[in-house]
Amino acid sequence: MDLGVLSLAVALGVFFAYLVDRLGYPPLLGFLAAGFIAGSVLRLSVPDILLQMLIALVAFEAGRQLGSGSLSPAAFFAVILEAAFVAGLSISVFRLMGFSLREALIVAVMLLSSSSLLVLKFTEGLPPEARNVAISLTTLEDTVLFIALSLLVGKATFETLPVQLVMVTGIGALSLGVFTWASRYIVGKEYAIPFALAAAFSLVYVVQYFNVASPYLGAFLAGFAFSRTDTYGVHNREAAALSNLIFYAYMFAIGASLPTHQINPWLIVIGLFLALVAMLIRGVAVFFGSLFMLGNPRTSARIAVSTAHISELSISVPVIAYSHGFVESPEFVLALSTVPIMSLVLAPIVWRRHDVIEDYVARRVRELRTTVAYEKLYKVVTHAFITAVKLVVILVVLAVAFAYLGWLSLVAVALSSVFLVRYSRQIYKDLLIALRELEGARYASAAVLLATFSLAIYVVLVLVGAYVEAHIYVVSAIVTVLAFLIYEIYSELHKERARRFNSSTTNL
């Protein structure tokens, strides 16, 4: 890499960023254009290890931004619905257009995130609640983008997805514990940021070693844990100062890494068409996701129009897919790389007509009645996943004990059974409190807990099959322990029912 050429390219990036910013678009596009020119005209090449390091740093920064912000619980469920709609619509539409399943999946991952800069600009006139949902939505979209990309690169399948999600949750909880312990020693120190980055790359190695997802997810988890444990926000402010530098260097490297030896003018036309289709898919998905959460079609339509574009970070998706061998056609990669840029150019044009779109939608879509308490439901879902992780750890230990310790494993069973029974009862009571406003809260709580146990037993059986000789009595022991816990839940429900019956009889 020639230093003079690099200096010239960086100067071009600053100049292009200034021009793009004056036009009202994200300045990151200026550095992307400079990187593209440096790679295609100046023949500047970016070492693969440098590109991988920059992507890991961007993942760390995305996790840090997620952890340092206050998120709307409604947006948490809206982004889940939106991701489901985006994935379903994208795969269906692009498969009908002749794309292979792998190519359709790559496009679906690209469409998962919108540009935060444009969302902040477009939502200035929204009511506070709706604007909070829109901003939280675009922040969570970056999270979903990195998780989906990590699982895709990690070659996740339908069978292994529950295992990978639970293991990622466990690694995230472990990283949070490490940062919580270390924060007392690094708070206010000059080496706090280097420590956080070192921990991020350590988690990159951990995730890569266990092969549960792409290594980038380890850096993302480290960024999230770092921001969560920085109670006073001292080091978050220091990290924020490096944020723009990381993103600019990242976009420059992505631009220089684009395959340019097969440039064809028709690729621009294809990119424009794909951008229009992608914006339509995102608009429809965000609209229905917001409508189910907020109930107001006009507000949901405005949120949908404000996020009907693709994040500049999504440009890295086809590049990473190309570098990992998921896509072999450089023309396809280059065409996909133009889609986010085209959508960012078209988004302000569409936004100017948002009043017409809102009026049209408000006349044809009825207002939905929403009665879900999102804060409580959010606690229920997160509690269930954390519970599944704890159960998996305990049951894997029991499985290993049964496989290798013989009769001595009965001691481990006796000690863990008491803890599991108490823990399951406490979880059930917590769920009852969280869902008490719902009709049939007892049965809803039992259903959530049973689903959590089912997830735990599935993950344990997969892990046991991979690392432990799968004796029939190991599986039997795990099933017996979970059956006993289910019986405890049933007895708790039965006691509750008997108490209510006795109280009603006494009143009569």
Image (tube, grey):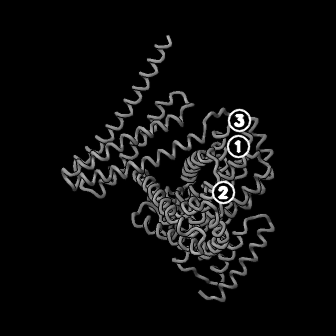
Q: Nearer the viewer, mark 3 or mark 1?
A: 1
Badge 3 is on which residue?
A: 365
Badge 2 is on which residue?
A: 114
* Residue situated furthest front in the rendering: 184
Q: Residues within 10 Å of mark 2 (few under 14, many from 20)?
A: many
Whichever of callouts 3 and 2 sits on the residue coming sooner in the sequence is 2
Q: Secondary structure at mark 3?
A: loop
How many marks are shown on the rendered structure?
A: 3
Q: Does residue 312 appear to the left or right of 470 in the view shown?
A: right
Q: Using the image as rendered, state which of residue 147 and residue 33 is in the foreground.
A: 147
Residue at mark 1 to residue at mark 2: CA–CA distance: 16 Å
* Residue situated furthest top in the rendering: 508
Is 188 rendered above or below residue 505?
Answer: below
Residue at mark 3 to residue at mark 1: CA–CA distance: 11 Å
The answer to whether residue 319 is seen in the rendering is: yes
Report the amino acid beneath label 3. Answer: Val
Q: In the image, which disc is placed on residue 319?
A: none
- The answer to whether the residues at label 1 and label 2 have Cβ atoms under 8 Å apart is no
Is 6 rendered above or below residue 29?
Answer: below
Q: Using the image as rendered, state which of residue 104 and residue 418 is in the foreground.
A: 418
Q: Does residue 400 appear to the left or right of 344 in the view shown?
A: left
Badge 1 is on which residue?
A: 300
Residue drawn at the location 73% of the way across and 77% of the way down: 14
